[in-house]
Image (cartoon, coloured by chain):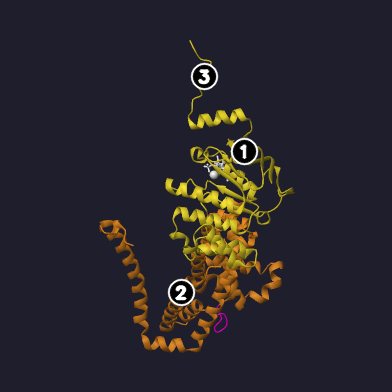
Amino acid sequence: MRLNGNRSFSSFSFLALASLLALFLFFVTLLLSVFLYVGPRELASSLLSEEILFSIRLSLITATMATAACLLVAVPAAYALSRFNFRGKGLVDVLLYLPIGMPPVALGAALLIFFGTPMGGIFSARFVFEVPGIILAQFAVISALATKIMKSTFDGIDPEYESVARTLGCSRFQAFYKVALPLAKGGLITAVAISWIRALGEFGATVMLAGATRMKTETLPVAIFLNLETADVVKMSAAVLILAGVGLTALILIHKLGKRWPAV
Amino acid sequence: MIRVENLSMRLGNFALTDVNLRVQRGEHSIILGPIGSGKTTLLKCIAGIYRPDSGRIEMDGEDVTELPPERRNIGYVPQDYRLFPHLTVSENISFGLRVRRSGNLEDRTRAMLDLVGLSDLSRQCIKCLSEGQKQLVALARALAIQPKVLLLDEPFTRLDSTAKVRLRRELRRIHEQTGVTIIHVTHDFEGSLNSRNRVAIMNDGRLVQDLSEIKKYLDEKLGYIPIDLRAGG
Ligand SMILES: Nc1ncnc2c1ncn2[C@@H]1O[C@H](COP(=O)(O)OP(=O)(O)OP(=O)(O)O)[C@@H](O)[C@H]1O
Ligand SMILES: [Mg+2]
């Protein structure tokens, strides 16, 4: 469909498109310069090194698990925040901005301190400087963000749809699952993509809680950090490119799968 | 039979106050009332979407005031239909049947499509329907579960005048064919009064009971000026 307004190419349209192009070129230039610095041969050998393969695998697993755990909590929490009225709701809503705005390092520090308390101490051996710590750190960074995205998605869906579903025989849960969730599909895909890519790139909280141990808690961002520390700048740059490549591939996959996701 | 007794409910600044209503089985009753008088609120109370502050609702002698909507067996057609946009026409119609896991799903869906005359559109997506077709799909979806009562919220007001005439005829036919009890609310005074339905008036959250009051109300709304017979020189 071609809207009439599109035909008159105003200076504003030009400005808007030029901004988009500039932004796109900005990031492409960044990636390209890293690529030229590393060179294809070095990139290939890095990609096949045991350390990087380990990092890729660890990153994929932790980001996926953190995203799954995050959605399991964020989707119902966002639904409750959108649909139910309770005392202190406004406060909860505002407080959820905090983990989004806090530096991940601060979140990681808080987690580390929590595991030093008598209550947290019970679990500390499982999380501190361990792989589950990575997942928990990523979860801490992405869960509030995913909740916010899902809340505004549910806010945009008239609850009357669920009311009708109820009169047709749905329980509250069925109305959520068969109507609200399929209608929230677009927001859900966005939430998955943003959470996952954010978890993949998570560094600050991960380092605080799980540490940066080579071949143990070495996710791709940690690999970048470790290679920088040993002044292996080429290898570090290769890790940057690989991180970008893995992220891009996954995002394309998420959107492809999301499109094919059938209506419930 | 539907019985509403002393139903009251506050919604912000608005209050549904002491509503009493009786609708016999198979009747098509119309509740007329101006915009914002509480018609939708009353329907939502009957459907179980809203929980009234006080009063009771009875269906066929059973007190349903505390029952959730999914256990009332009421067909609800909201003001703007709320057809599920992620489903096709026939999936919308069979929605309630699938939830209830009722048998002969396909037969019943086809029967409903026939009833509203939309068999050709069964695979159509909701976005591509005309306003009148949407109304018919919403009717079929609500009727598919064989409800005890059908609640219609302004079923014709979004239609243009030709569609209105056609839909009114369709509704009469569907009512005759299914014998379902209908409670139908609208603010469209002219459009609803030429039928032989039972009529009640809602004004500012109250059902007007007194006959002379109803008459006065209708006169005002329709703009008739009563002739003063005693007037003279
Ligand atoms: N959730 C709500 N919170 C507060 N006030 C509400 C709410 N829903 C409805 N109201 C108010 O209650 C009054 C009655 O609303 P209702 O929707 O029942 O009117 P109606 O008779 O159906 O009107 P219309 O003919 O425009 O559909 C209105 O004044 C409306 O503003
Ligand atoms: Mg209304």
User: What is the distance, in whole Å, between disc 1 and disc 3 at their CAs?
Assistant: 36 Å
Q: Is residue A90 left or right of residue A34?
A: right
Q: Tell me the kind of residue under disc 3.
A: Asp
Q: Which chain is orange?
A: A
Residue B228, numbered circle: 3
For ligand 1, which image quadrant applies? top right
Q: In this rendered view, identify the residue nearer to me: A254 or A200.
A: A254
Chain letter for the part of the structure drawn in yellow: B
**Closer mark to the observer between disc 1 and disc 3:** 3
Judging from the image, mark 3 belongs to the subunit labelled B
Chain ID of residue with mark 2: A
Are the residues flagged by discs 2 and 1 from a single subunit? no
Say whether marks 2 and 1 touch (CB < 8 Å): no
Query: Does the beta carbon at disc 3 come under 8 Å from ligand 1?
Result: no
- Expressed as whole percent of the image width and height from the top left, the position of residue A116 reads 67, 69
* Mark 2 crowd level (few <14, some 14–19, many ≥20, 10 Å Cα): few
In the picture shown, does residue B211 fall above or below A68?
above
Instruction: Give yes or no for residue A214 being in the magenta stretch.
Output: yes
